[in-house]
Amino acid sequence: MTNNFKINSTNILTFTNNKMKSSERLEEILKYLKISANKLSVEIGLKDNTKIYHIKKDRNDISPEMAKLITDRFSEINYSWLLTGEGEMLNNQTMIHEPPTEHYALAEKEKIIEWLNRELEDKRGMIRHLIDESNQKNNEINRLKSELDMLKEELKKKEPSLKK
């Protein structure tokens, strides 16, 4: 797919594409938001990331319901573009009239801090999940050890009768 960034006659930065697939549009959104597919699932209120990963893997297209969830949470994303790939990815395109100001730089730093905080929370969630999974595996190992010990004891009891 060809992606083009350009400044139109009214000095608006625009993004155009040639019929991107749903998976490609999703990737563009994830890059723009600087979040993972898992984090997007959480942000839009899904109970798990299955639907997002089905879109990423081209198993499903972005449905109107999914597009609404995403655009309700991230209002700058263009609903129509998300569904069809036509038009601009963002609703409010950035005006380019003058060089960035100190206020602009501060706003960018705040966005970076916000993104870092989201990433940190995402990593904390992953760590919590891994700890839970590790605890479950340890419990399973302990259960199997107990079962093995019981089988060894049972075998010891039956050994004398097996030798006859």
Image (cartoon, rainbow, N blue to C red):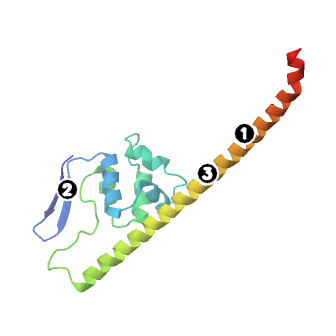
Nearest to the eye among marks 2 and 3: give it.
3
Residue 2's spot in the image, x, y percent? 18, 49
Q: Is residue 47 left or right of residue 43?
A: right
Q: CA distance from mark 2 to mark 1?
A: 58 Å
Badge 2 is on which residue?
Answer: 16
Question: In this view, which residue lies farthest toward the left?
Answer: 9
Number of other residues with Cα within 10 Å of mark 2, as a class: few under 14, some 14 to 19, many 20 or more: some
- Say few, some or many: other residues with alpha carbon within 10 Å of mark 1 (under 14 / 14 to 19 / 20 or more): few
Give how far apart the Cα atoms at labels 3 and 1 are.
Answer: 15 Å
Q: Count the marks: how many?
A: 3
- Residue 123 percent location from the top left of the image: 48, 61
Tell me whether circle 3 and circle 1 mark residues in contact (CB < 8 Å). Answer: no
- Kindly identify which residue carries mark 1: 144
Q: Is residue 90 above or below residue 136?
A: below
Residue 4 position, x and y percent, is 16, 56
Asked if the residues shown at circle 2 and circle 1 are in contact, with their CB atoms under 8 angstroms apart, the answer is no
The reply to whether discs 2 and 3 touch (Cβ–Cβ < 8 Å) is: no
- Rounded to the nearest angstrom, the CA distance separating label 2 from label 3 is 46 Å
Q: Earlier in the sequence, mark 3 or mark 1?
A: 3
Q: Amino acid at mark 3?
A: Ser
Earlier residue among tags 2 and 1: 2
Vertical relation: 154 (above or below) 19: above
Q: Nearer the viewer, residue 16 or 123?
A: 123
Q: Secondary structure at mark 3?
A: helix
Residue 27 percent location from the top left of the image:
33, 52
| Amino acid under disc 2 | Thr
Q: Is residue 66 left or right of residue 83?
A: right
Answer few, some or many: residues within 10 Å of disc 3's Cα (few below 14, many 20 plus, some between 14 and 19): few
- Label 2, secondary structure: give it: strand
Question: Residue drawn 87% across and 24% down?
Answer: 158
Numbered badge on residue 134:
3
- Look at the numbered disc 1 and give the secondary structure of its residue: helix
